[in-house]
Amino acid sequence: MNRVLRTQWAPLLAATIIAGVVLSFSTKQFGSSFNVYTILQTASVYAVIGLSQMMVLAVADMSLAVGGIASLVTIATGNLYQVQHWPIGAAIAGSLALGLVCGLLNGVIIAMTKLSGFIVTLATGTAFTGIAYGITSSIPYSNIASVLTTLGQGRAAFFSYLVLPAIAMTLAVGAGFRWLPIGRSLLAVGGNRDAAVLSGLSQKRAIVTAHAVSGLLAAIAAVLYIGVLQSATPATGSDWLIISFAVPIIGGTALVGGEAPASGCFVAAIVLSAINDALIVLNVNTEAVQMAEGLLIFAAVIAGKLGQNVRTGTRRSRRPSTGPGRLGQIAQDSATPGLGMP
Amino acid sequence: MHQEPSAEARVETLALQNISKAFGGVAALIDTSLELVRGEIHALIGENGAGKSTLINIATGVYRPDRGVIRVGGQVVHFSSPGAAAEHGVAVVHQERNLVRKFSLAENLLLGRQPVNKGLVSYRQMVADAKPWLERVGLHFDPRTEASRLSPGQAQLLEIAKALTRRCQVLLLDEPTSSITDAEFEHLMGILRELRDAGTSIVFVSHKLEEVYALCSRVTVLRDGRNVLNGVPLAEVSQGDIVRAMVGRHIELFASTGATRRETGPAHLELRGVSTELGHHRIDLTLHRGEIVGLYGLVGAGRTELARSIVGLAKITGGELRVAGKPAKIRNPYDALRHHRIGYVSEDRKDEGLILTHSISRNVGMTVWRRLEAKMGWISESRVRPHVTPPLRRLDVRMHRVSQPVGSLSGGNQQKVSAAKWIAADAELLIFDEPTVGIDVAAKDAMHRLIAELADDGTAILLISSDLREVVQLADRIVVMGEFRILDELAGGGEYGPISERVMQAITAATLAASPVARDAVAGSPTH
């Protein structure tokens, strides 16, 4: 419990819940089960988009191609199903594989050229979107398989079915970082590249893996979003860039790498979605909604920074000291009595 | 004292023979050799830029030699990667702390080889595996402790433990003592001797000759990428011989001339009962013009933090700070330099002191831009240069031209540039934070001379150092700090022995008062 309270997003979630309760009393619409369903539906897609970016942030890199991959994958799904008449299962599998390959491509280019992910994904992301528009001549596919529609639109009262895949992804990514050796390598490379490399871990492998999984997650988000939109359009992903960074950052992911709080992503997605929704319910115009998003990112980062300072003292000012006083204190904390130094 | 292994017992472990290596046409090593035998601690010494790091990187598979042979246990080997060297039992503890700070001690120790059960990392197994290795080097912590909580010395021990887990035959230590306390050094020496007696060959790179003599049996000295001394028993060479071998000429060490107490002027900076947000409590400290005050303490005593508070990088929450007799409020380092002529030469020259990719003249000129600009409205290289060249010349910075990037200089020369910047700024009070950590004997000597000269010219100097010898030599007054308080104050320039005894007593007493748990630690620690 203590650990939950100390996380970066805890105050934000608390504030959102309080605001939500207040809002649901003042405007009937906000607390309605349909509205809560809408919030969860959007949040589920946001969460997977955020996880996609978080994969790459974990190795201290970034991807501007999350949206581009989503655009291409959306088109692939629509095309394979509507034009090539593949069964929907095969069409989805093929599209997810395509997302994985796009991410893999990013990773390989970055690892081989040693260019920054920023530059490489700026180029590839734009190219992916371009290909998607080219294939469709900008016309969306409108024949959407019922399984996707059911998933995207279905609900039990306020509970959107999309929450299930989103939670599954969150748990999978969280567990992967915690328990898979490759997950630990990603965090080690992100946390201290030199230490990781000198310990025999491969930086290239970590970067390629991170981008590949990021591509797969972007593809999953895209497939889920087809059902929400009930259309497979190349415009999907065009507005995902900010979301992809906002979600992990608000969720407590450090831009310097070495951290990957998947659950934070999920909470941040709900917070973002709820705030967007509240502003719309309150009839605030769209530009203001975007501004609010920006302020929220800012607030989250500042809250995180303050929290960090409270926990560890300001940067460098409280370096771990060697004074025996401190040693004694740590020794008391640890199970073994006695001291570090004889 | 350790006995020299007899001729029969001299089993070669790692040998680097006639190694040459060039980077972009510049020779870093020329026909250099380093031969290790079982159960010895071998000192590797040389000025910064002499090729020690290159040699170590070749021994551990980071670089491949252009020419020459590497043998392990008599067999010729080719290391294609650090992993390959590790497989042959060659491990290294680098100067930089190579820890993943967010990971536990156990995971850092077993990084890349975490125990796996059915494809998943087993944390329980990891803790169990790590415990004995941590105990072995005297890190009696819960293996689940986050690595960020370790002091630099403890981080060093963790790295040694990491090397041990790889069951190494050869352990290379690249300046392991540059940022650790005396007590930690004693502990480290104990562990290294144990390893040596168990048959490990250890290479010990250090700039501190006292340590080398205390620990090592043989020495290899490099100069400009060549062997000057090759595996000579330390019993046969004096400290003077080694210094001469390193620098290639005889230098009259400033150290040996000793400090003279100087006439000091009026008080320049006064702290009266100052408390800070970082935890300092009622600090009283006065610096006079033309005086060197040595601020000594263990790592973590709060010295750097005090310096940072003075120049406005942390808030002063109580008491009064006076500059030149008037109460002053310093908001940031810019304010400190511009309005109070106080400069802070930071300990961390790479991160805070210099912009490595910028030219020497830009780095040095940074502090004078504002002054020149105020007069003329613009800055040009030709206007800055007259302000930049004298301090560089005065410090004898070895460079080709002032437009070359600072990053291309050796560590010692970088430190000189960092100091030159503040001389160009014409400060009236300079705070030097660990000015000689990790730089070689000649550069250190130049730095000592510079500090003394600045004081002779009337600059007030606060010298923060963990090297008590340095403090005793240079300072007119020594202020001892511990646990963010001033513990004692005494005159400098005296005999090292009695001063060090009194300083250690002050620190010990304060520690005992602060933490009863630490009593054992202190009772066992040496007081010189």
Image: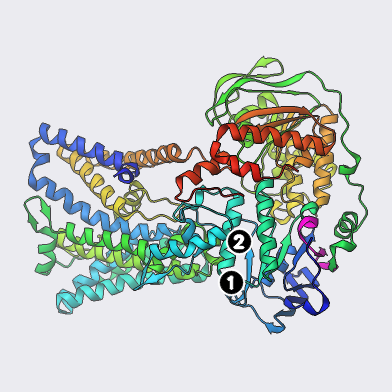
Relative image position of residue B446 (x, y in whole percent): 83, 45
User: Which label belongs to residue B160?
Assistant: 2
Residue drawn at x 25%, y 44% is A271
Q: Which residue is mark 1?
A: B167
Relative image position of residue A148 (x, y in whole percent): 14, 66
Which of these two is toward me, B294 or A75?
A: B294
Q: Residues within 10 Å of mark 2 (few under 14, many from 20)?
A: many
Q: Residue B224 colored magenta? A: yes
Residue A65 visible: no
First reached walking from the N terminus: tag 1 or tag 2? 2
Provide the chain ID for the residue under circle 2.
B
Q: Hey, which residue is sitting farthest left in the picture?
A: A157
Residue drawn at x 9%, y 59% is A154
What secondary structure is marked by label 1?
Answer: loop
Q: CA distance from mark 1 to mark 2?
A: 11 Å
Residue drawn at x 57%, y 73% is B83
Relative image position of residue A340 (x, y in whole percent): 57, 50
Q: Residue B325 colored magenta? A: no
Quadrant in which residue B473 is drawn: top right
Give the magenta part as a residue range: B212-230
Residue drawn at x 34%, y 67% is A213
Q: Amino acid at mark 2?
A: Ile
Q: Amino acid at mark 1?
A: Arg
User: Which label belongs to residue A340?
Assistant: none
Q: Hey, which residue is sitting farthest bottom in the picture?
A: B75
Q: Residues within 10 Å of mark 1 (few under 14, many from 20)?
A: some
Q: Which image quarter is the C terminus of chain B in?
A: top right
Which of these two is toward me, B314 or B333?
A: B314
